[in-house]
Image (tube, rainbow, N blue to C red):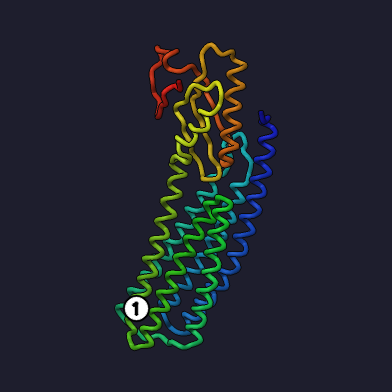
């Protein structure tokens, strides 16, 4: 059985290593996003293309969101204290919400510029150098999305996942802008502001994805399937069943509580030992669990006077 102090040290070391790796990813992505953003904005002002300029500001918001993410995970790294017994991990989720707010701002600006140019259309300058610049920034964004998506899966990081989704929307907007530039070159200048509207749609979709994931964490949506947890519990000798299994938190920072059914005739010390075996096996099977609170009680047929208030239940094993 693993001592709580040893478990705490292991978790602390794991979280510190994760924090350092997430920060390293974000810093690299920040540099690449700044290069892409400034290249697009300069090209947009030089060519007069509202689609390129909108895409450039979209990329600049990518960089700003990296800064927000770095601040958020620094706050999330702080250990639990008297006022925050569950730690500060939700600050990372709040940073994801900060990214969403930045996206809403750029969405409004992009849509405003697009509608303004629809009312007063003008043909931007399309040169091979400009198209080449957009192709290079597109290639950089492909690298960023693949790198950040891979890191988010490896580290179970909400903030990297949210940022990768944001950058992925930038990929599609750049493709739309390139298509619009081709149309302008062929003599259809109206495609430039229309591409700006397409940019706003992609930004809105990415924002919706981030909002959906962040709301799940902030509203304590279930994280680990109850049947998966029960399969581990039922394999422990001495356990009759379980109920009221609840998980909450982020994908990599889960809190679990449950009621464990043990024969009412079992000595307290033995029942307590069994609960720790259950806890150790659960945390070994699901390393994202940072703490598990287990309430020991006899099964319902041994405690008929109890009123059932369970969210879920399982029949005692035979």
| Quadrant of the image occupied by residue 107 | bottom left
| Quadrant of the image occupied by residue 280 | top right
Between residue 306 and residue 73, name the one nearer to us.
306
Name the residue located 48 percent from the left edge and 88 percent from the top edge: 128
Between residue 197 and residue 224, name the one nearer to us.
224
Q: Is residue 37 left or right of residue 197?
A: right
The image shows residue 108 at horizontal and vertical percentages of 38, 65
The image shows residue 68 at horizontal and vertical percentages of 55, 57
The image shows residue 109 at horizontal and vertical percentages of 40, 68
Most extreme residue toward the front is 318
Q: Is residue 216 left or right of residue 17?
A: left
Name the residue located 54 percent from the left edge and 56 percent from the top edge: 160
Most extreme residue toward the left is 119
Name the residue located 38 percent from the left edge and 61 percent from the top edge: 204
The image shows residue 81 at horizontal and vertical percentages of 62, 36
Identify the secondary structure beneath mark 1: helix
Q: Residues within 10 Å of mark 1 (few under 14, many from 20)?
A: some
14 above or below 299? below
| Quadrant of the image occupied by residue 7 | top right
On the image, numbered disc 1 is attached to which residue?
117
Image quadrant in which the C terminus is located: top left
177 above or below 312? below
Task: Tally the numbered discs.
Answer: 1
Between residue 160 and residue 315, name the one nearer to us.
315
201 above or below 241? below
Image quadrant in which the N terminus is located: top right
Q: Is residue 131 left or right of residue 192?
A: right
Name the residue located 60 percent from the left edge and 26 percent from the top edge: 276
């Amino acid at each position: 059985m693993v001592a709580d102090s040893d478990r705490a040290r292991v978790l602390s070391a794991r979280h510190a290593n994760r924090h350092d790796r997430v920060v390293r990813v974000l810093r690299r992505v920040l540099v690449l996003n700044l290069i892409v953003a400034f290249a697009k904005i300069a090209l947009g002002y030089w060519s007069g293309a509202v689609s390129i300029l909108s895409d450039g500001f979209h990329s600049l918001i990518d960089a700003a969101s990296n800064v927000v993410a770095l601040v958020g995970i620094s706050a999330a790294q702080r250990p639990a204290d008297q006022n925050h017994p569950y730690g500060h991990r939700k600050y990372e989720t709040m940073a994801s919400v900060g990214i969403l707010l930045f996206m809403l701002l750029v969405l409004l600006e992009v849509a405003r510029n697009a509608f303004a140019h629809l009312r007063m259309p003008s043909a931007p300058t399309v040169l091979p150098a400009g198209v080449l610049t957009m192709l290079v920034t597109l290639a950089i964004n492909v690298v960023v999305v693949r790198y950040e998506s891979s890191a988010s899966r490896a580290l179970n990081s909400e903030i990297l996942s949210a940022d990768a989704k944001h950058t992925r929307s930038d990929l599609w907007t750049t493709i739309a802008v390139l298509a619009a530039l081709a149309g302008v070159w062929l003599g259809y200048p109206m495609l430039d502001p229309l591409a700006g509207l397409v940019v706003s749609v992609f930004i809105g979709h990415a924002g919706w994805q981030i909002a959906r994931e962040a709301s799940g964490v902030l509203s304590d949506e279930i994280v680990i399937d109850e049947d998966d947890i029960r399969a581990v519990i039922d394999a422990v000798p001495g356990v009759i069943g379980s109920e009221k299994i609840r998980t909450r938190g982020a994908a990599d920072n889960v809190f679990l509580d449950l009621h464990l059914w043990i024969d009412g005739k079992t000595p307290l010390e033995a029942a307590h030992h069994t609960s720790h075996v259950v806890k150790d096996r659960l945390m070994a099977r699901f390393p994202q669990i940072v703490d598990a609170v287990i309430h020991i009680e006899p099964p319902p047929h041994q405690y008929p006077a109890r009123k059932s208030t369970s969210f879920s239940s399982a029949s005692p094993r035979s």
